[in-house]
Amino acid sequence: MNKITINTAVPYDVVMERGLLSRAGELALGVSDQCKVCIVTDENTHRLYNDTVAESMALSGFDVYKITFPGGEMTKTIDYFSTLLEFLAENQFTRSDMLVALGGGVIGDLTGFAAASYLRGVGFIQIPTTLLAAVDASVGGKTAINLVAGKNLAGAFHQPKLVIYDPATAETLSHDIFLDGLAEAAKSGVIEDRELFEYILAADEPPFSEFVMRLVDSSVRVKAKLVEQDEHDGGVRQLLNFGHTSAHAIERLSNYDISHGHAVATGMLIASKAALVNKWSRSDCYSQIKTFLVRYGYDTECRFTPEQMAAAASVDKKRRGDTISVVIPLDIGECALMDIPASGLVDFFKAGI
Ligand code: GLY
């Protein structure tokens, strides 16, 4: 079993191997006594995997409760958050009980924030079932829900006790959802791991499971390195936001019709073009990132104007007072943070779009 330890204040493991869903209970016993567990899923993951995980948990002696939400970004609302908290209270969950997020980034973020808030904090396990959640969202302890004003505007840092990834889950993803995760993996490559980016760019139909394991393993290692240095996102961790200032604006402007990873792909293109035009980067990262987008069939056009993008990005949580931090690629494998005034966002987008 492949294991990566995330050395945050309280360290935890990310374990990955085919077939781990049916061993979830045994693995959970490594981080918790037998207790009540609430498995949180969306309708799709419920249908595919809930029985496997619930049976494994029950066989290991956990008292299993289940709650299922609709799929999609619209589930990360205060209403569903409240529904989850009330469910835990009605079923008398205590501080020694635990939540299990079984699903993609939406379920992980919602469940993690409920775990951070309920009784001022209970433990939770992440079982990501999308590539995007495996390469990024399930690791690092960022949890959140969306507000009407923008994405992830209410949340908490709350690290999971364990992350369990079964690469067989990637086989049931639609191509579009797979591309969501691939964009985040490519992002990890541009930030910190040139070999990973080049591997993705050159991959010549390797066995699917080998491809998925490489994407997850390398991306989690990049993330671990940055999160361990800056658990609470005051400095280098912000490099993981490469492409995200644009992405959050695109998602919101499209009413979440454009999904996160696709928006990140466009966001990386915008940031790298702005960096090229303004001569901030050392090499032409823009062409290489564009080659990645074209090769895998992402949309290379931004549907929104620089003015619309700037207005939407100005309520982003990456804003501090009148400045906003954007991530700029210097070279493939090396990025830097750059503070620009909120009033300069239009120029940034004019250069990038
Ligand atoms: N997804 C970016 C981070 O976890 O910091």
Image (cartoon, rainbow, N blue to C red):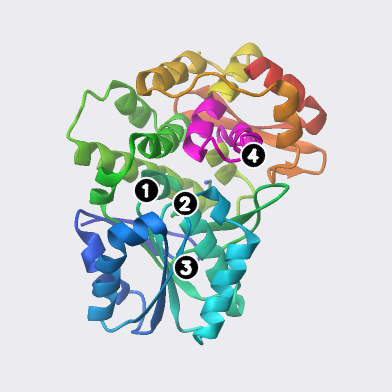
Q: Residue at x 54, y 30 (%)?
A: 335
Q: Which residues are magenta?
A: 242-268
**Cβ atoms under marks 2 and 1 closer than 8 Å:** yes
Q: Amino acid at mark 4?
A: Arg
Q: Which mark is residue 10?
A: 3
Q: Identify the image quadrant of residue 186.
A: top left
Mark 4 or mark 1, which has the lower sequence index?
1
Q: Reading the chain from its start, which is encountered first: label 4 or label 3? A: 3
Pick whichever, 132 or 289, lies toward us.
Answer: 132
Percent x, y for residue 46? 35, 61
Mark 2 or 4, which is nearer the eye?
4
Residue identified by numbered label 2: 105
Q: Identify whether 262 is placed above or below 51.
A: above
Assign a secondary structure to mark 4. Answer: helix
One can see residue 203 in this view: yes
Give the residue pinned by disc 4: 252
**4 vs 1, front mark:** 4
Rendering quarter of residue 319: top right
Dot 3 amino acid type: Val
- Between circles 1 and 3, the one closer to the viewer is 1
Q: Does the magenta portion include 258?
A: yes
Report the residue at 63% width, 64% height from top: 79
